[in-house]
Image (cartoon, rainbow, N blue to C red):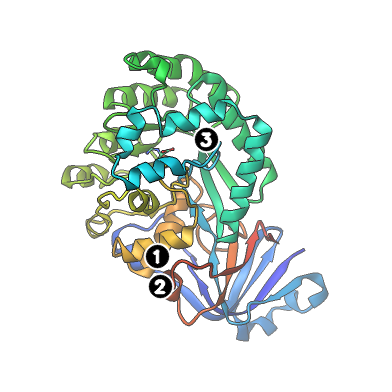
Amino acid sequence: MNILIKNIKTLVQIDNSLRSKASGKEMSELETIDDAFIYLSDGKIDKFGKMIDLSQLPELQNQNSYQTIDAAGGMVFPAFCDSHTHLVYPASREIEYIDKIKGVSYEEIARRGGGILNSARKLQEMSEEELTIDALGRLQEIARYGTGAVEIKSGYGLTTESELKMLRVIRRVKELSPLTIISTFLGAHAVPLDYKGRQEEYVDLIINEMIPVVASEGLADYIDVFCDRGFFTVEDTDRILNAGMKYGLPPKIHANELDYSGGIQVGVKYGALSVDHLEFTGEAEIEALLGSDTMPTILPGAAFFLNMQLAPARRMIDAGLPVAMASDFNPGSSPSGNMQLILSMACILYRLTPEEAINATTLNTAYAMGLSHELGTIAIGKKANLFITRPMPSVAYMPYYFGVNKVEKVILNGKVV
Ligand code: NIG
Ligand code: FE
């Protein structure tokens, strides 16, 4: 049934010009309408405007033809787009978290066979059904916090069979969940133990065996590589992205989390849709990104959880770049998919204004999934993915009042979930 939401205190992030992303100074532009309504029809945004103009719309006079929701002073935002997660995973890893508190580094845990390899071992023992049920639970959880679209990566498989298992789970949750889901193949997440000292052979396996079958079964929208110190080199990344391009898999890559790895540059070279993490970003990296179509994506949850230096978001925006911010929801470096918390971290830790932070978590993350034509703003014809908040005094209250859920109702594809 179509839905009319009335008495909206502020309708946030409206967009009449159908921007594909916001860069530099544009990131502080956030259009709003006070005392607003929005009408959703056939799963799409049909019209919106001021409450006083509602009575003049003839098509809304027959109130039996649609459901009315009274926002009662709450605000309406476009649902968050979370462009980087690993939310299909087998089990939590709080034991490693305690090691990290005691001072053991992420890389040291990985060298000991923990980290990603720990998840890979456990994933092999789980069935597709079990993984699907757990992932659906996490999707429900993030939807309650206002996320309406999410990218999910493989990368806890690390054998052809297990990587395919993960990607099939992603395909299954895509069918079952009301969220919009994008799938990314991340065979190059870590080198499995049996390939220790033979990294190139593992890269060969990805190129010669995994990519062709992933592509032929249509299991992924994008390809990813963890291009960083102690993981995959620029040369490995170059080979993998090149193979991915041949099979029509555009890249979105993990880069510059642990060092000035060259990941940003190799991503830009292959026209990556996004490069993600970016703690080690200097002038050369900013220069490489300027003039490219690649979305620099920062993952505040991982930097916070691993106690890392922060990516220079402010410097990037001031240089004219766009910035997206996503959750990185995963059991090792960011066990949270709460995008409201990311919004607060964007402001508190990275010094983005609330307007910039909202663009970073809606429009720019939609771009980083290749979806900004249909998601990320309140625009006529876009998918009706939005949420209604509790009554709030201002838009800035959303990042300001951090740590609790301000979302009261979530609507995805024009239906209350
Ligand atoms: O994005 N940095 C690499 N990969 C993930 C972590 C995955 C894990 O530790 O399980 C990330 O932070
Ligand atoms: Fe990640």
Amino acid type of disc 1?
A: Ser
Is disc 1 in contact with disc 2, using a CB cutoff of under 8 Å? yes
Q: Quadrant of the C terminus?
A: bottom right
Circle nearer the N terminus (2, 3) = 3
Residue 109 rendering spot, x and y as whole percentages:
35, 34
Residue 54 rendering spot, x and y as whole percentages:
66, 81
Q: Nearest to the eye among marks 3 and 1: give it.
A: 1
Q: Label for residue 400? A: 2
The front one of 381 and 360 is 360
- The residue positioned 51% from the left and 33% from the top of the image is 154
Q: Label for residue 344? A: 1
Amino acid type of disc 3?
A: Asp
The front one of 25 and 8 is 8
Residue 212 rendering spot, x and y as whole percentages:
51, 19
Q: CA distance from mark 3 to mark 1?
A: 30 Å
Q: Quadrant of residue 186?
A: top left
The tally of labels here is: 3
- The residue positioned 45% from the left and 79% from the top of the image is 394
**Residue neighbourhood size for the residue with mark 1, other residues' Cα within 10 Å, grouped as few (<14), some (14–19), many (≥20):** many
Residue 7 rendering spot, x and y as whole percentages:
62, 81
Q: CA distance from mark 1 to mark 2?
A: 6 Å
Q: Residue furthest bottom?
A: 52
Q: Which residue is mark 3?
A: 221
Amino acid type of disc 2?
A: Tyr
